Amino acid sequence: MAAFTTEIPPELARGLDEAVDILAGRTFSVLTGAGVSTDSGIPDYRGEGAPTRTPMTFQQFLASETFSKRYWAGSHLGYRRFAAAAPNAGHRALAELESAGAANGVITQNVDGLHKQAGSRKVVDLHGAMDRVLCLACGQVFARESISARIEAANPWLDTAGAVEIAPDGDAIVTDIDAFVVPECTVCGGRLKPDVVFFGEFIPAEKYREASALVRSSDALLIAGSSLVVNSGIRLLEEARRRRLPIVIVNRGATKGDSRATVKLEAGTTETLVELARRLG
């Protein structure tokens, strides 16, 4: 693992010992949220200091050309940041835990693809991935890089947009979008959409089944960097609780699952996951 050094605060040491006692000798699944990627430069929706945002819903995206332009312009600029981001030591720690046989895989609410880049082999991307684009009409799948190249060719003025605020879902706020040219499917001319789950859109049933199967094949559940506000996370936590699995939560700030956790660590995910990998790997 690349070096990541930080002193564990005394108040965290006891909780870490309890988490290690719970997870040692057990095969556990991991559920991650935006907090795992903040040290890679990708912001968190609900962490301390995060601005209040109302993401575009799927219904809005479909409703008008204006919404579609706004989304694609922002998503393109946001994807540039995502594409430049690199896995941090926390991502690599989870990959090490999987390689060591301690973790059976990662279920992530993130769309940044950093778990796979870090070397995790079993990754269930509950909310999709920003590096894929789908045609809503014919189902054709495109690599995001090819769509980005088309957007840049048709909208060279975007290079002058300057600094923009990026959200965890890869969106960004762009106001001057009247001249934006939205890419279309080169197969059928249909509407394109990044392969991510919008607000107001259901997680694909097969994705949830895959995540649920991972939890069912585990002896414990580790949750890192998620406030568990999104329904999919709470449903997986409840599956673990009903099976009487130990649950360890690592997150700065309260989560909706704290009362159901066996151990809650109020801590940053990177340093905590690195320490868990050191002790359990």
Image: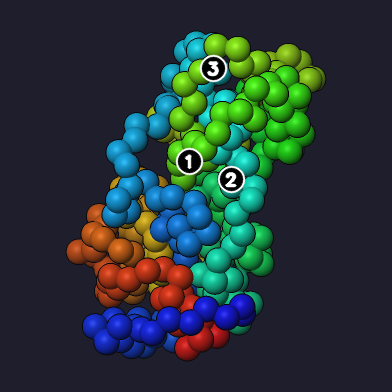
**Colour approach in the figure:** rainbow
Q: Position of residue 197 (x, y in %)?
A: 50, 36
Q: SS for tag 1?
A: loop
Residue underneath mark 2:
81
Helix, strand or loop status at disc 3? loop
Q: Residue furthest right?
A: 187
What amino acid is labelled 2 in the image? Arg
Badge 1: few (under 14), some or many (20 or more) residues near its Cα, within 10 Å? Answer: many
Tell me the residue that label 1 is attached to: 166
Disc number for residue 177: 3
The correct choice, above or below, for 181 with respect to 129 in the image is above
Task: Give how far apart the Cα atoms at labels 3 and 1 are.
Answer: 17 Å
**Dot 3 or dot 1, earlier in sequence:** 1
Tell me the kind of residue under disc 3: Ile
Q: CA distance from mark 3 to mark 2?
A: 19 Å
Q: Of helix, strand and loop, which one carries label 2? A: helix
Task: From the top left corner, tell me how far across and down residue 149 is, in percent.
Answer: 75, 31
Type of the residue with mark 1: Ile
Q: Earlier in the sequence, mark 3 or mark 2?
A: 2
Q: CA distance from mark 1 to mark 2?
A: 8 Å
Residue 111, above or below 201: below
Residue at 61%, 78% in the rendered image:
2
Residue at 32%, 42% in the rendered image: 51
Q: Quadrant of residue 137?
A: top right
- Spot occupied by residue 134 in the image (x, y as percentages of width and height): 66, 30
Residue at 44 percent of width and 19 percent of height: 60
User: Looking at the image, do the residues carrying marks 3 and 2 touch, with CB atoms under 8 Å apart?
Assistant: no
